[in-house]
Amino acid sequence: MAEQVRKNKQTPDRSEVTTEVTSTATAQSAQTKSDLDELLDEIDDVLESNAEEFVKSYVQKGGE
Amino acid sequence: MAIPKICGIETEYGIQIRGSESNPILASSLLISSYVAATSKKSDAQGINWDFCDEQPAIDARGFSYEDSFAPEIESHLVNAVLTNGARYYVDHAHPEISTPECRTALEVLAFDCSAEEIVRRSMKLAQPFLGPQAEMVLYKNNSDGKGNSYGCHENFLVSREVPFGRLVAQITPHFVTRQIFAGAGKVGCEIPGVSEREVPYQISQRADFFEEEVGLETTLRRPIVNTRDEPHCDPQKYRRLHVIVGDANMSQTATLLKVGTTSLILAMIEDEVMPVDLSLAHPVPAIRQVSYDLTLRQTLLLRDGRRMSALDIQWALLEMASKYSISHGLECLGGQDDGEQILQLWETVLEGLSGEPESVSHLVDWVAKKRLVDGYSQRHDLQPGDSRLKAIDLQYHDMREEKCLALRVGLDQIVADEQIQRGVTEPPDSTRAFFRGKCLERWPDQVISANWDSMVFEVDKGPLRRVPMMEPMRGSKELVGHLFDSATSLAEFLEQLGV
């Protein structure tokens, strides 16, 4: 039943976390870290060179 | 039973001409005119004009009209075009704005929101030759300039007129305050005067700083969490259009789908009077900011009945009610069981992620994806809160130039196929009256005098002008009128077969 699957998750049961899950999570975390490093290398190339001027000159009128 | 949740999204884009004097109204006009001139099917290359006769933004859903309120003025002299995909593309105040056609499902409106981005990108390129050699037109799909000026991304939902408006406000407000935990686009800093970047270096929502009232008519000043504009653009005896101004413009397709899908679902539950748990907040206006500033997602909000719940708790409670509703009432109001189940599954996935390790949903949720960039870049370069480079990351996350857009680089999940996005630039949805509007514009562009959401005006064989009312959003679909477009050899024959 969907309502059983989607029971309130506000108090997760920490005792169910196994060593196996932890090591998988560590591997994933390392992968995520290297992805982030690659992404940050790219950001260095893509980010507007004069960030201060870029940000300062962006002024909009309120809308809606 | 709840009525079909016809929906649409209207997005105001930030606009700037870099390297030149930039008048935003002229820039917006140039942007849209360039696109209309290049794509119009009319023989004079002009666009189809918007018909303003139905616009009444000052009427309040609570049944009265404010004399002293700041109801939006209609700027009928500015560029205002209707496109063959059924969308409206126009200058609103000092921003270009695009409204998707009316859609039957959240997934469909997501696709047309993506097509709107594509229209904006094409428009930027088409406008470029009209600028000087050093100038560049740039648009941003965000909601603030970081200096206290905000512009909106509004959703619209068809709601039964039978629902008392007071109950609607009471029951939807907890969702509007808390849905930002998955629909927030993230913002570096805070725009409340007197609040420093050290106090709020990063927040979940672009828009939370700008809401000052629980309920009201205004959209530009004293913005309310629930907007009361009562302008249904369809049969006012049967329907309301709930005009939602509280949301952020999303770069994440998942966030857009969930923002519209969860809201549609809760509105259906309100119509069917199936909201067994009262989640009314004691102080919704401070709560919307508290949620936006609480990156731990663990702070609790005071409910009117004295309980305390976090934004996550409230979202889990709403999901639980929605899951039960899907079993007891079905999900036809969302366009079918599959469409509805997709929303429920995604909703659960993001709440699971946010409840455990928020970074695990950086491919789904904008504020998490942006925060990951901001934090990573800060650490790498040892930057302090308030550094311009962090604000530049925030701005460029929403940059409509593909070569500069950071949201395109952070690994967000793509839900809508590229071919569908391209098709939606010119083709209307099959499912609503937008099909009728779009196909008439494509087929008889020189004979359409004007169009708006709920009518079109035609000139047939130099005779008197003929207005075709479209007061039912579901009529005019491909299923109902597609065969007439196929068989009619002229507009006169088409209108005759239509019986108008």
Image (cartoon, coloured by chain):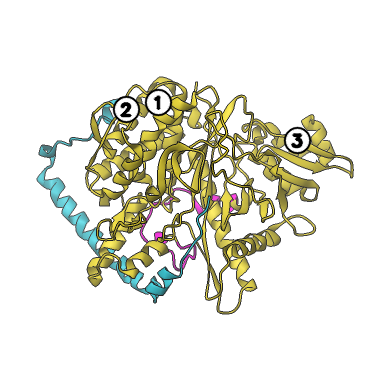
- Callout 3: few (<14), some (14-19), or many (20+) C-alpha neighbours within 10 Å? some
The secondary element bearing badge 3 is classed as strand
Q: Which residue is mark 1?
A: B326
Q: CA distance from mark 3 to mark 1?
A: 37 Å
Vertical placement of residue B393 versus B283, above or below: below
Tell me, what hue is chain B? yellow
Q: Which residue is mark 2?
A: A2
Pointer 3 with pointer 1, Cβ within 8 A: no
User: Which x, y percent locates residue B312?
Assistant: 27, 39
Residue type at numbered disc 2: Ala
Residue type at numbered disc 3: Val
User: Which x, y percent locates residue B150?
Assistant: 46, 54
Q: Are marks 1 and 2 on the same chain?
A: no
User: Which x, y percent locates residue A46?
Assistant: 39, 71
Q: Which residue is mark 3?
A: B468
Q: Which chain is cyan?
A: A
Residue appearing at x 80%, y 57% in the figure? B43
- In-front residue for pair B390/B305: B305
Dominant SS type (magenta): loop
